[in-house]
């Protein structure tokens, strides 16, 4: 099966500019996650969708970050305006639903988008 | 607070040597733990999870609730095991993962 697709792979912007990332999960996966991975750290969850509804956005800096998953399939994550500390890899992941059986609680990751804010 | 700690940033061993990547967690309740791996220029992928009690690529990990640990072990390291390894804790009712900072394993010939 095709994996989680993300684009672009790399993005360089100046601070205060806007940027958007796109993610297409594995077909049929109802749950979609956006993680931020700063250099030297593990991934940190920003937002989690179940179909097109948000179930967890407690660590999303809502003054500058937004995300949507309008039709319950692909998703976009936006940063506006970007700050230097937003430089990171942004990972998208998906998991199947219902979360039972052998696939229970397994998340499948995309290749990520590396963002550099100058 | 729920937390995952991987105390070593880098673990360097020679081929054929035993490997133990340490992971400690903080969680109130019955934990569900995972090891994810990222090989060079590849995406993050699941290596193993404690509920499966399986051995993948020769790696095993046992949950020790008394020591709140989930260390990853392999008796004889191979060069192809060189990668970043992340321990992760499942948190809450919506399948949220909390990751440790990761340990880079370097296996030398």
Image: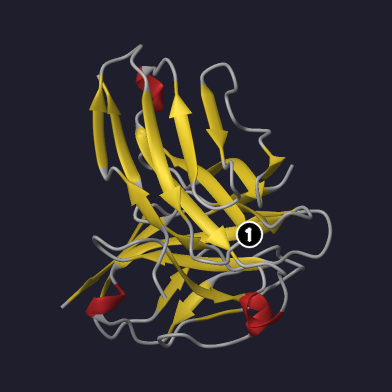
Between B64 and B39, the one nearer to me in the picture: B39
Residue A99, position as x, y percentages in the image: 71, 69
Residue B104, position as x, y percentages in the image: 34, 59
Please state, as top left, top right, bottom left or bottom right, where the C terminus of chain A lies in the image. top left
Between B74 and A26, the one nearer to me in the picture: A26
Between B55 and A62, the one nearer to me in the picture: A62
Q: Is residue B41 left or right of residue A83?
A: left
Residue A14, position as x, y percentages in the image: 26, 16
Residue bearing mark 1: A30
Residue occupying the point 55% across, 70% down:
B71
Given the image, what chain letter belongs to the residue carrying mark 1? A
In the picture as drawn, the residue positioned furthest to the right comes out as B29
Q: Is residue A84 above or below residue A40?
A: above
Residue occupying the point 38% across, 56% down:
A5
Residue occupying the point 24% across, 40% down:
A10
Q: Is residue A21 above or below residue A100?
A: above
Mark 1 Cα-neighbour bin, 10 Å: few <14, some 14–19, many ≥20: some
Give the quarter of the image for residue B16: bottom left
Residue occupying the point 68% across, 79% down:
B51
């Amino acid at each position: 099966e095709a994996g989680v697709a993300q684009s672009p792979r790399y993005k360089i912007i100046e601070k205060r500019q806007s940027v958007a990332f796109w993610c297409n999960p594995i077909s049929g996966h109802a749950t979609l996650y956006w993680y931020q991975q700063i250099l030297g750290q593990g991934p940190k969850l920003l937002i989690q969708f179940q179909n097109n509804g948000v179930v967890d956005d407690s660590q999303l800096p809502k003054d500058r970050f937004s995300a949507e998953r309008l039709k319950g399939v692909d998703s976009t994550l936006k940063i506006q305006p970007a700050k230097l500390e937003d430089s990171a890899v942004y990972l998208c992941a998906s998991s199947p639903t219902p979360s039972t059986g052998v696939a229970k609680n397994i998340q499948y990751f995309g290749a990520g988008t590396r963002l550099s804010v100058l | 607070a729920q937390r995952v700690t991987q105390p070593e940033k880098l673990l360097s061993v020679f081929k054929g040597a035993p490997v133990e990547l340490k992971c400690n967690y903080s969680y109130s309740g019955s934990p569900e733990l995972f090891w994810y791996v990222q090989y060079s220029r590849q995406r993050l992928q699941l290596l193993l999870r404690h509920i499966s009690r399986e051995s993948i690529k020769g790696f095993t990990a046992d949950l020790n609730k008394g020591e709140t640990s989930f260390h990853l072990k392999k008796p004889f390291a191979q060069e192809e095991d060189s990668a970043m390894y992340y321990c992760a804790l499942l948190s809450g009712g919506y399948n949220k993962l909390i990751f440790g900072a990761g340990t880079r394993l370097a296996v030398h010939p």
